[in-house]
Image (tube, rainbow, N blue to C red):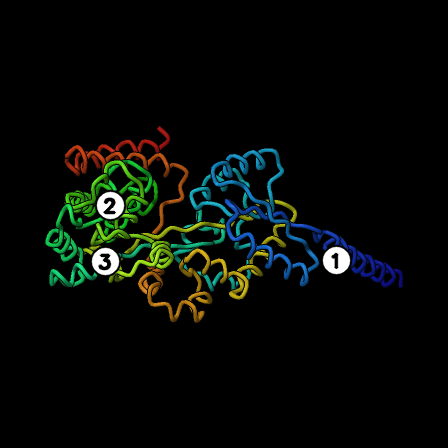
């Protein structure tokens, strides 16, 4: 009898503990989440999503805005002081650093399986560190080839479909000073790498070895890619050694460039400015060993706060097509999820079609902490070859030696 009473009391105590835990969990639901956007990006869309999230959950989402220029410094300061926000929009190259700082959560512990499955694998790969998803893919863009079709037709030249055909067409159509064959940059400006990377990937180049502990950009494909880029630079617009991406896009809009690799934002500029010349957008022609295209993507970070579970709930709410699509349309970004890609806006948009069809093949800059320093080495190597006439293999080997020292911590 006594054992029965004790067992009953233990059961009651367990039930009470479960009930108390449930109450505590319910009380732990925050009144407010802090979300940081950068440069006022998508603020209006975010505020609408925050309002509908509050209606569903009773949790307010305060949208704060940091300027792009000092966002990283401000976030690191907040992380160091333990006052980080719950969520922030940010750049992909922060993921390695923020993981090392133990500032952000493993998304796998909070996201629903359906949410994870909806986003493309290559987008998740950008945010993955040691097999863990440490960020949520956000705005994505990739590159295709803009072609002045009117000039090609006048010359009787077909739109190229391979890298060899592209180089031959660029050489054949080049007619300075009336117009120039190819738009790119040779200076060590940050935009230079985007133009080079689009050719590098198309020719099978790899930035890092498979184990990510050494670089691979100086292998046979990488050297050939830089030699090809040097060849294309001989037909580039004036000022390629000193300008930025806008120098290139402005020249294409002025019909001074025939071939111009670029992202979808150029479409918005062409439409907004009423450009009516005959242009076409096609996938970047591939070399014999290439199958990747240049991708650029931003990331959402969920920081380690008591509210991580609810921060993920807000992101899943925000990423519903009806909530997030207006932001994607506003900036002409490319869908990185199955649900966005299935929307009628993308299914019927002919200008975006080349970008959308290539999105699952996009390759991004590495997210290792050492990458910004390594990229500077590569950009300098490109400038040495294209401007100073240095040998591609020699300068890439030298850059690789320095890069590997950085990776080894020397």
Q: Tell whether label 3 touches label 2 (CB within 8 Å).
A: no
Q: Residue at x 45, y 54 (%)?
A: 139
| Secondary structure of the residue carrying numbered label 3 | strand
| Sequence-first disc among 1 and 2 | 1
Q: Tell whether label 1 touches label 3 (CB within 8 Å).
A: no
Residue 73: percent from left, percent from top? 51, 34
Between marks 3 and 1 in the image, the one whose residue lies nearer the viewer: 3
**Along the viewing direction, whichever of 58 and 177 lies nearer the viewer:** 177
Q: CA distance from mark 3 to mark 1?
A: 61 Å
Rendered-image quadrant of the N terminus: bottom right
State which quadrant residue 6 falls in: bottom right
| Secondary structure of the residue carrying numbered label 2 | loop
Q: CA distance from mark 1 to mark 2?
A: 60 Å
**Along the viewing direction, whichever of 165 and 80 lies nearer the viewer:** 165
Label 2 Cα crowd, 10 Å radius (few <14 / some 14-19 / many 20+): many
Q: CA distance from mark 2 to mark 3?
A: 14 Å
Label 1 Cα crowd, 10 Å radius (few <14 / some 14-19 / many 20+): few
List the residue tagged with mark 3: 147
Q: Residue at x 28, y 31 (%)?
A: 402
List the residue tagged with mark 1: 22
Residue 356: percent from left, percent from top? 35, 63
Residue 47 position (above or below residue 102): below
List the residue tagged with mark 2: 184
């Amino acid at each position: 009898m006594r054992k029965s009473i004790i067992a009953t009391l233990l059961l009651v105590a367990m039930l009470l503990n479960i009930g108390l835990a449930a109450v505590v969990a319910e009380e732990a639901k925050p009144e407010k989440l802090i979300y940081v956007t950068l440069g006022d990006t998508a603020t209006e869309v975010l505020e609408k999503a925050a309002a509908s999230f509050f209606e569903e959950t009773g949790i307010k989402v305060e949208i704060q805005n940091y300027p792009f220029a000092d966002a990283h410094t401000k976030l690191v300061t907040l992380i160091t002081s333990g006052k980080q926000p719950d969520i922030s929009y940010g750049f992909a190259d922060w993921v390695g650093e923020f993981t090392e700082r133990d500032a952000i959560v493993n998304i796998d512990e909070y996201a629903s399986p359906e949410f994870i499955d909806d986003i493309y694998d290559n987008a998740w790969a950008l945010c993955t560190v040691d097999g863990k998803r440490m960020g949520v893919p956000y705005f994505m863009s990739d590159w295709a080839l803009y072609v002045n079709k009117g000039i090609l037709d006048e010359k009787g030249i077909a739109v190229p479909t391979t890298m060899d055909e592209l180089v031959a067409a660029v050489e054949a159509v080049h007619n300075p000073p009336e117009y120039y064959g190819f738009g790119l940059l040779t200076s060590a400006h940050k935009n230079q790498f985007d133009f080079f990377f689009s050719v590098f990937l198309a020719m099978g180049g790899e930035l890092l070895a498979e184990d990510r502990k050494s670089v691979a950009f100086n292998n046979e494909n990488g050297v050939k890619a830089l030699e090809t880029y040097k060849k294309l630079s001989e037909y580039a617009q004036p000022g390629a050694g000193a300008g930025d991406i806008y120098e290139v896009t402005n020249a294409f809009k002025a019909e001074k460039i025939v071939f111009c690799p670029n992202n979808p934002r150029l479409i918005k500029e062409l439409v907004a400015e009423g450009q009516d010349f005959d242009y076409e957008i096609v996938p970047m022609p591939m070399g014999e060993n290439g199958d990747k295209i240049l991708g650029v993507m931003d990331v959402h970070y969920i920081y380690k706060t008591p509210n991580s579970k609810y921060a993920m709930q807000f992101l899943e709410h925000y990423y519903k097509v009806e909530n997030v699509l207006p932001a994607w349309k506003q900036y002409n970004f490319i869908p990185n999820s199955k649900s966005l890609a299935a929307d009628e806006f993308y299914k019927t948009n002919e200008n975006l079609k080349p970008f959308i069809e290539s999105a699952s093949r996009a390759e991004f800059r590495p997210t290792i902490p050492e990458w910004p320093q390594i990229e500077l080495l590569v950009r300098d190597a490109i400038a040495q070859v294209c401007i100073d006439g240095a040998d591609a293999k020699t300068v890439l080997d030298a850059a690789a030696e320095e890069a590997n020292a950085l990776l080894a911590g020397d």
